[in-house]
Image: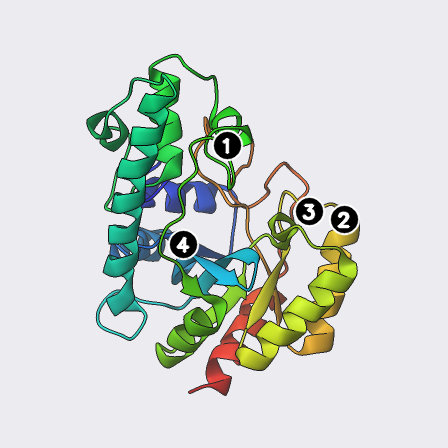
Amino acid sequence: MSDGEDSPEQVMRLAAEANLAHVALTDHDTLDGVDRARSEAAILGIGFIPGVELSVDHGRTKIHMLVYFLDSGDGPLQSRLGELRDGRKDRNAHIVEKLNRLGYEITIADVHRHAHGPSVGRPHIADALIEKGYIASRDEAFTDLLRDGGAAHVERIRLTASNAIRLARESDAVPVVAHPVTMGLNRDGYGETFRQLTALGLGGIEAHHPMHDLALRDHLTALASALGVAATGGSDYHGDTKRSYRVGIGRGDLRVPEAAVEQLLEQQSRYN
């Protein structure tokens, strides 16, 4: 319901085909797909974990944060999601203006044609550029134009990592740092940053991700164990045409252990 191309039901069916025991749906800044995914997962006999993905700041470091067990309905973090989506709307308009000045003739209407839910962002702007023939892929759009610091980049409202963790815990959910490799840190940087975040209530580190090589997966798993948080994983699937990740197995070598779910449940129980 944010930047993926398949419906929540289709994602659950792909999870069943991959023989997954559990699956989470974590769209950006919205829970709109959670109830639909849960219903389909129940039919298919798969354990379902509701969630959301946030973009947060920790000092100068930008982090994607997965929040597991965040359900639809009322709650401290749920009430902030609309504000975050409004921030995206304002930024989208400014990005389109920048692109127009750079000679890329797209409109907000072009962008919205590629969105399937209320959370509209840079991936949909990339899709509009692809449709117009300006670029060939989302990756190309983010290499130059849309990346942080790129020619058409515009900052938006973000929660701090501290506030996101606090709101997640107050909502009986578990905050987990997504794909740490994108944080641009070395091994020492991971250790220091995750120690700081764990002290704030972080519940896990996404050790198993298609972008991580085996050495990094092992390092992050060991770091999570040392800090007493969950070592989680995910295929980060967005659709067959968006990137070469498949549900459950990423590029083919991803294996997320059952212990990840057990550790997440333990994390959730600590704050109940």
The residues bearing labels 1 and 4 have C-alpha atoms spaced at a distance of: 21 Å
Q: Whole-Å distance between the Cαs marked 3 and 4?
A: 19 Å
Question: Is the residue 186 above or below the residue 94 in the image?
Answer: below
Measured as percent of width and height from the top left, residue 134 is found at 41, 14
The quarter of the image holding the N terminus is top left
Tell me the amino acid under the disc marked 4.
Thr
Q: Which residue is mark 1?
A: 142
Q: Label 3 amino acid?
A: His
- From this viewpoint, which residue is outermost toward the top? 133
Of the two numbered discs 1 and 4 in the rendering, the one whose residue sits closer to the viewer: 1
Q: Is residue 6 left or right of residue 214?
A: left
Disc 3 residue crowd, few under 14, some 14–19, many 20+, Cα 10 Å: some
Mark 3 touches mark 2? (CB < 8 Å)? yes
- Residue occupied by mark 2: 214
Q: Are marks 2 and 4 in contact (CB under 8 Å)?
A: no
**Crowd band around label 4 with a 10 angstrom C-alpha radius: few (<14), some (14–19), many (20+):** many
Instruction: Residue at 69%, 77% (x, y): give it.
Output: 227
State if disc 2 and disc 1 touch (CB < 8 Å).
no
